[in-house]
Image (cartoon, rainbow, N blue to C red):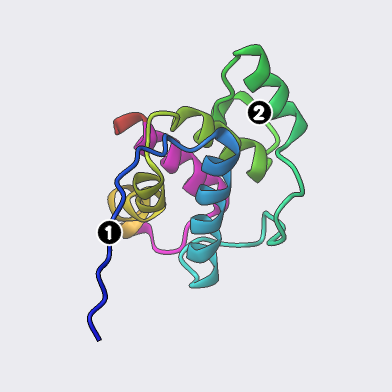
Amino acid sequence: AFIDRADIKAFIGLPSVNARFAILRDCTLELMRVGLVATTQISLTPPPVLPLEGVAAAASGASVTPASHNDFDFDTHLLACAMAAKDLSGRSLRKLPFLTFATHLHSSGISTAKDFVEALYKTIEDE
């Protein structure tokens, strides 16, 4: 059977901060699942909403960086990465965690979640 198919090309736009956060978290959890990033510091179940502290900072226009907290909170720091990645497409966001591991962490073996998120932030700044 012959099927004729029309492809529609439409600009969708860049992902929102919620979508960027979800993409980065999903890819990071995959690295944790395969054992490249240690899972001891975070809960593997996603938060129902973005961390309130980060959302408030995003709404006020303030920046949240991984270095701005003494206590490491994975989701808050990952939100900082999502906020910094505002000009990246969904496809680029999916590549970032793997690019981070390949460029910053490959020689160190298994890294902690904190080291990984800090390296991810550097990778985003380099993009």
Q: Is residue 19 above or below residue 61?
A: below
Residue 63 versus residue 59: which sits nearer the camera?
A: 59
What amino acid is labelled 1 in the image?
Ala
Given contact means CB atoms under 8 Å apart, are the residues at marks 2 and 1 in contact? no
Q: Is residue 96 above or below residue 43?
A: above
Residue 19 versus residue 12: which sits nearer the camera?
A: 12
Image coordinates of residue 113 in percent, x first then y, are 56, 52
Residue reaching furthest bottom? 1
Q: Quadrant of residue 10?
A: top left
Who's the residue at 46% across and 63% down the image? 110
Mark 2 vs mark 1, foreground winner is: 1
Who's the residue at 46% across and 65% down the image? 36
- Residues under labels 2 and 1: Cα distance? 51 Å
Q: Main secondary structure of the magenta part?
A: helix
Quarter of the image with the N terminus in it = bottom left
- Element at badge 2? loop
| Residue corresponding to mark 2 | 69
Q: Is residue 58 above or below residue 47?
A: above
Q: Find the magenta span and give its range.
A: 108-124
Who's the residue at 69% across and 27% down the image? 55
Q: Is residue 41 above or below residue 1?
A: above
For residue 6, the mark is: 1
Q: Is residue 121 magenta?
A: yes
Q: Quadrant of residue 74?
A: top right
Mark 2 vs mark 1: which is more N-terminal?
A: 1
Quarter of the image with the C terminus in it = top left
Relative placement, left or right, of 53 versus 120 is right
